[in-house]
Image (spheres, grey):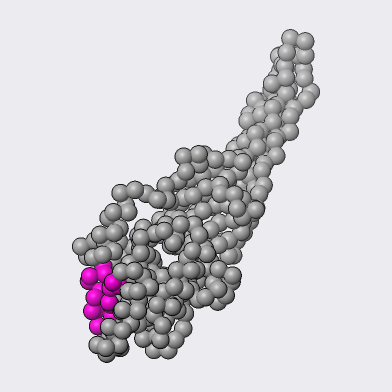
Amino acid sequence: MKFLDQAKVYIRSGDGGAGAVSFRREKFIEFGGPNGGDGGRGGDVWAECVDGLNTLIDYRFQQHFKAAKGGHGMGKDRTGAGGEDAVLKVPVGTQIYDEDSETLLADLTEVGQRVLLAKGGNGGFGNTRFKSSTNRAPRRANPGAPGQEYWLWLRLKLIADAGLVGLPNAGKSTFLAAVSAAKPKIADYPFTTLHPNLGVVVGGHDFVLADIPGLIEGAHEGAGIGDRFLGHVERCGVLLHLVDGTQDDPAGAYRTVREELKAYGHGLAEKPEIVALSKVDALSDEERETAAAALAEAVGRKPSVVSAVSGEGVPEVLRLLGRQIGVTKTVDPNAIPAELDETWQP
């Protein structure tokens, strides 16, 4: 399944039905009077957070969502039928933005959350509503109110407990495959992951781990695939920063990624970070000590040493992640702002 984390959609709520102009015409009733019914209410447009989805690929093939119009009123005081609602089903972690792509309208972080995006138009009054002591046979009715229409942006930010960051070919996908049942693409030639992958780590601390495509220098300016996927680690409680131990300058690689995190902003540079020197199975003892010392000088503390291939150091890193996740979960850093009401409407 193709991973899609951003989509633009058009929504329109239903128009209200028109009221009816009608009169009673029964035999032996001389002054029957008006009996035109009201129009039905137009359907609403809702966004609903559902389980079982992890991409916005459905909105790649359908971008227009329109609720049904309300039925027109009829004689014998019959009210028109209400229009059927349109529901946009989105995965957990979806944010809904206005057309300007900056104004946040809703943040759906739990299964079952619903938010009203566009309210249907009210039905018009039938002529029965206009009967009075001075106007016994009104011949007027109201049309239904029009619905609302908007263009909106849907953006998916994966909800994971921990995120893997680092340069391309730092061993992130290999690490994810080693500690979970996820099956990201792995090969014996250099390449970069093109979309995030999620895996569930099962053990003393069960948690969700996200593999984010590698950053390169200048990613915040659009170099490579840019920093478009960094939004998926905004919700993570802790970052696992993997640095390839087989490259010439591990310290420089660490600083490159840190600079990109700072340039991106949104608090990523302030998140708890565990730094690990990866691919140590391919290093001699002397090379391992040299790389670890250089990385420790850049980080300011001793890094972990791991090899996803041989399993060296992996349990220790998972314990560090589990301990840190337990701390960060006591306070939710991504709670929905108090001013954001679930019943928002334009």
Q: Which one is in front, 226 or 179?
A: 226
Q: How many marks?
A: 0
Based on the displayed image, in which of its 4 quarters is residue 82 positioned?
A: top right
> In the picture provided, is 132 more to the left or to the right than 102?
right
Q: On screen, 13 above or below 258?
A: above
Task: Locate residue 124, reporting x and y percent.
Answer: 69, 31
- Residue at horizontal 35 percent and vertical 60 percent from the top: 272
* Residue 314 part of the magenta segment: yes
Task: Please indicate whether residue 119 sits to the left or right of residue 91 in the image.
Answer: right
Give the residue furthest to the left. Answer: 204
Q: Residue at x 49, y 49 (%)?
A: 107
Where is residue 34 drawn, in percent x and y? 72, 20
Could you tell me which residue is drawn at 22 percent across and 71 percent down?
Answer: 315
Residue 272 visible in the picture: yes
List x then y, in percent, for residue 62.
60, 61
Stretch in magenta: 302-318
**On the image, which quarter does residue 25 sit in?**
top right
Residue 311 falls inside the magenta stretch: yes
Q: Residue at x 42, y 47 (%)?
A: 335
- The answer to which of 77 and 14 lies nearer the viewer is 14
| For residue 109, above or below residue 26 | below
Location of the C terminus (image quadrant)? top right
| Residue 120 sits above or below residue 226 on the image | above
Quarter residue 161 falls in: bottom left
Confirm whether residue 55 shows in the render: no
Q: Position of residue 40 (x, y in %)?
A: 63, 35
